[in-house]
Amino acid sequence: MTDTIRIINATILTSADAPLLTPAFLEIAGRDISALGLMDRLPSSAAATVIDARGQLLMPGLINGHNHCAMTLFRGLADDLDLISWLNGHIFPAEAACVNPEMVSWCSKLAAAEMLLSGTTSVADGYFHADAAAAAFRDAGIRAVVAQGVIDFPAPGVPDPGRNIEMLEGFIDLWLGKDPLITPAVFAHSPYTCAPATLQRAKAAADRHGLLFFIHLAEGQNEAGMLIDARGTSPVRHLKALGLLDARTVCVHGVWLDDEDLDILAAAGASVVTCPQSNMKLASGTARVTGMLDRGIPVGLGTDGCASNNSLDMFREMDLLAKTQKLANLDATALPARQALACATTGGARLLGLPQTGRLAVGCRADVVLIDLKAPNLTPFYNQDLLVYAARGGDVRTVIVDGRIVVRDRRIAAFDLEETLTAVERLAGGLAQYRQGDPDVH
């Protein structure tokens, strides 16, 4: 008996635009997919674990390209506010008061549970106390690109902003190459919270180690007027002048980009993660995703943090991505469902440097999800377009990451979810004064 998992009698979707295989099987050996095909090619050898997936769809795990996972603590804390009021009046003060390693650990683990239960197997996280987040993701069994936050004012874990790059380097040294699920990265918050020298030093640190450099960019309409020591007439042109744009630069949001900005990103090979739900909720606008894709800019999809979404369900995010692009372009054919699905799978894998994920093929990492096709909202199931327009996280039954079953029959298998929920509820008890509408908040 070998250490294998065999999934049989499934309908299999190998990638966003591939034809469905049914009835089909997939076999996992160790961390990788070792075989897949129609049931008449099923190996005669035994397997350690057999999952009969009759009536279920087997698909690649979804990839959340941008999240601030520990912000699950702030879900619903302050809603229906513009971006700057939301940040300065509620989020930044709450973070200053309560973000510490314990909070980041428990709240990142809670986010991991929500993501795993809704079919996300990989996430790019950017926040503070990144070491605690990385450990939480490792224990939860989710694949993660974990970026330490860099910002030019006192921040959780970095009370002296003059040491932000030193702290970043320490985090990288601690995690680089140490765990197969965790990839360290750099997250410079934005060009309106980081001075040019800080941005350049953060990018240099990323380049020294061959890591990704994430930055919030062009999220708000007035961001160009907020830049610290502006070197260009737009946030993109500012970054270009500073020499920060290349194939390892991941620009998050990218809502307010003109044609010149898009051409600059395409020429540099930089990528964009779009977060439609967060951008809608904060009235930031709608990113020109079709224009990005037309230029060959790699595009991934993210939820952003719970405080500005308020959900981490990537099925919901795919639906909004497709529909907002149709509305913005007044074209029902703009950004078809399978293109939205690609942004959440192969697109995310490409820009996060995880080429062995986002699709099902022999030799790829075994990051797979089983979806219940007997759910009323997925009956009848003609093709994968329904995954974008009708599926939801609650349709997920089983999740495997790196060859390990982490969700079994809609129950977290890798850690004690009840313990995590109890810990987060305890932490939430100390946030009353930061809630929207509280008389102590001005």
Image (cartoon, grey):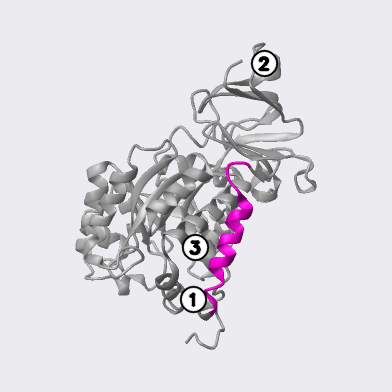
Decide which of tag 3 and tag 1 comes sooner along the chain: 3
In this view, the residue in front, 260 or 364, is 364
In this view, the residue in front, 36 or 225, is 36
Quarter of the image for the N terminus: give it. Answer: top right
Q: Is residue 417 magenta?
A: yes
Which residue position is annotated with label 3?
A: 71
Q: Which mark is residue 172?
A: none
Amino acid under label 1? Asp
Decide which of tag 1 and tag 2 comes sooner along the chain: 2
Q: Residues within 10 Å of mark 2 (few under 14, many from 20)?
A: some
Q: Which x, y percent locates residue 365?
A: 50, 31
| Magenta-colored span | 413-432
Q: Residues within 10 Å of mark 3 (few under 14, many from 20)?
A: many
In this view, the residue in front, 81 or 296, is 81
Which residue position is annotated with label 1?
A: 82
Q: Secondary structure at mark 3?
A: helix
Amino acid under label 2? Leu
**Is residue 115 positioned above or below 421 on the image?**
above
Which residue position is annotated with label 2?
A: 42
Cα separation between marks 1 and 2:
55 Å
Q: Nearer the viewer, mark 2 or mark 3?
A: 3
Q: Nearer the viewer, mark 3 or mark 1?
A: 3
Say which residue appears at 28% left-offset and 45% top-offset.
Answer: 173
Whether residue 118 can be seen here: no
